Image (cartoon, grey):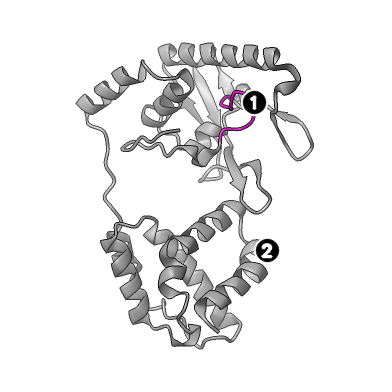
Amino acid sequence: MTFEEFVQRWMDVYMRVKLAVKTRNAYESYLNNGVLESLGKFKITKIKTYDIDVFFKEQGEKNKKSLSGKYMMLKSIFSRAVKWGIIKESPIKNVDRSEVAKRNRELLFYKEDQLKLLLSVLENIYPKHRIQIKLAVLVGLSMTEIAGIRLENINYKDNTILIDKTLQYDKETKKFFLGPTKTKRPRIVDISQTFMREIKAYAVQQKKLKISSGSAWEPMLDEEGNLVNLLFTKTNGFPTHPDGAKLSKGTICRN
């Protein structure tokens, strides 16, 4: 059996049944971003620790992302292969995870002058994108947290926002859903009074757009069929895909 053939069985019997949607999506992305290309044709019983080390060395040289995530996925795959009696010992057992992590690119953060320049540029872009970027760089929210903000989460009186859910997308069912935050704990973030006025103005415009759209408005519904009042949506009310933008303290890409 090749590694790729085993992975297909692992996905059908284990991954899609046991793992959370966010993890499943990440693992499928890892498989299609270098893992199957490099290891797919190997006989799974012939893969050695050396082959895994070579894989991560090549990934690091190509500046590939998510090396730690790929390490954890491969650990899961080979661990399951051992439990199912396909192989006797996991070839990733002796791979040093700390060495894998070192191959990830260094995180970059904005300097004060860069942040001032960014904020000045943001004044000339679409309000939705401007507010999303500010929530990322000034408040430290991830894109899935930003996309998961509902109108009822916003406290205009206290200038705070409750971050209790993230917007996620299930590639299997092709549906959006609200999942937990990374820590699985809700938290309240403080917003400056000036920035909160900007958020409130945007929310008001969103409400007006919803009313004027009438039946053309296509909001997200929860599992019980209830309306989910997301702050950020497309112009027809449909959720903005959380993967549509990668916003971080050091990087900004198109939404």
Q: Is residue 115 above or below residue 69?
A: above
Residue at 41% in and 11% down: 194
Residue of label 1: 237
Residue at 48% in and 65% down: 73
Q: Quadrant of the N terminus?
A: bottom right
Q: Is residue 194 above or below residue 78?
A: above
Q: Quadrant of residue 116?
A: top left
Label drawn at residue 17: 2
Asked if one can make out residue 71 in the rendered structure from this viewpoint, the answer is no
Q: Crowding near pointer 1: few (<14 within 10 Å), some, many (20+)?
A: many
Residue ranking furthest to the right: 224
14 left or right, relative to 128: right
**x, y percent for residue 227:** 73, 28
Q: Earlier in the sequence, mark 2 or mark 1?
A: 2
Q: CA distance from mark 2 to mark 1?
A: 32 Å
Q: Crowding near pointer 2: few (<14 within 10 Å), some, many (20+)?
A: few
Residue at 79% in and 37% down: 224
**x, y percent for residue 141:** 44, 34
Helix, strand or loop at mark 1: loop
In this picture, which residue range is highlighted in magenta?
231-240
Question: What amino acid is at disc 1?
Answer: Gly
239 magenta-colored = yes
Q: How many marks?
A: 2
Name the main secondary structure of what is drawn in magenta.
loop
**x, y percent for residue 105:** 28, 53
56 left or right, relative to 174: left
Helix, strand or loop at mark 2: helix
Q: Quadrant of the C terminus?
A: top left
Of circles 2 and 1, which is in front?
Answer: 1
Label drawn at residue 124: none
Question: What amino acid is at disc 2?
Answer: Val
